[in-house]
């Protein structure tokens, strides 16, 4: 089982999202629970972001990295601003 760590940027984005779109906020929470069980299921990124992975939520993208037994959630932002 993996542990999960959130960046400050991710936590700020989630607080804004909670106020703006509660349904999306809850969907992300559910997906984070699934992520802890199987973090390698989602698509790995390439080039500059090699070593990171992504999960799409509509027009939002969550970027994370697996480091040994820890999943580091880096950011969630609109697709146009994530990469």
Image (cartoon, rainbow, N blue to C red):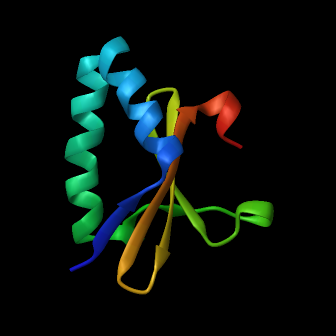
- Picture quarter with the N terminus: bottom left
Q: Relative to 69, is 3 above or below? A: above
In the displayed orientation, state which residue is furthest to the top: 20
Is residue 6 depicted above or below 10 in this figure?
below
Left or right of 33, for residue 12 = right
Quarter of the image with the C terminus in it? top right
The structure residue drawn at horizontal position 35% and vertical position 83%, both measured from the top left corner, is 69
Tell me the residue at 24%/21% (across/down).
Answer: 23
Looking at the image, which residue sits at the far front? Answer: 8
Residue 58 horizontal/vertical position (percent): 44, 28
Residue 13, image x, y percentages: 46, 32
Task: Kindly tell me whether residue 57 is visible in this rendering.
Answer: no
Q: Within the image, what quadrant is residue 35 found in?
A: bottom left
Residue 45 or residue 5, whichever sits in front? 5
Determine which quarter of the picture holds residue 30: top left
Residue 57, image x and y in percent? 41, 35
**Relative to residue 30, is residue 60 depicted above or below?**
above
Number of numbered discs on residues: 0
> Which residue is at a point 61% across and 32% down the rendered structure image?
79
Residue 75 in view: yes
| Residue at 48% in and 53% down | 7
Could you tell me residue 51's position as x and y percent? 63, 72
Kindly indicate the quadrant of the structure image that contains residue 24. Answer: top left
Farthest-out residue, bottom: 68
């Amino acid at each position: 089982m993996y542990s999960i760590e959130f960046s400050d940027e991710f936590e700020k984005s989630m607080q804004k999202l909670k106020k703006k779109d509660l349904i999306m906020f809850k969907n992300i929470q559910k997906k984070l629970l699934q992520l802890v069980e199987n973090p390698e299921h989602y698509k790995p990124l390439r080039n500059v972001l090699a070593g990171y992975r992504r999960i799409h939520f509509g027009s939002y993208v969550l970027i994370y990295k697996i480091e040994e037994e820890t999943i580091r959630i880096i950011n969630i932002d609109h697709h146009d601003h994530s990469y």
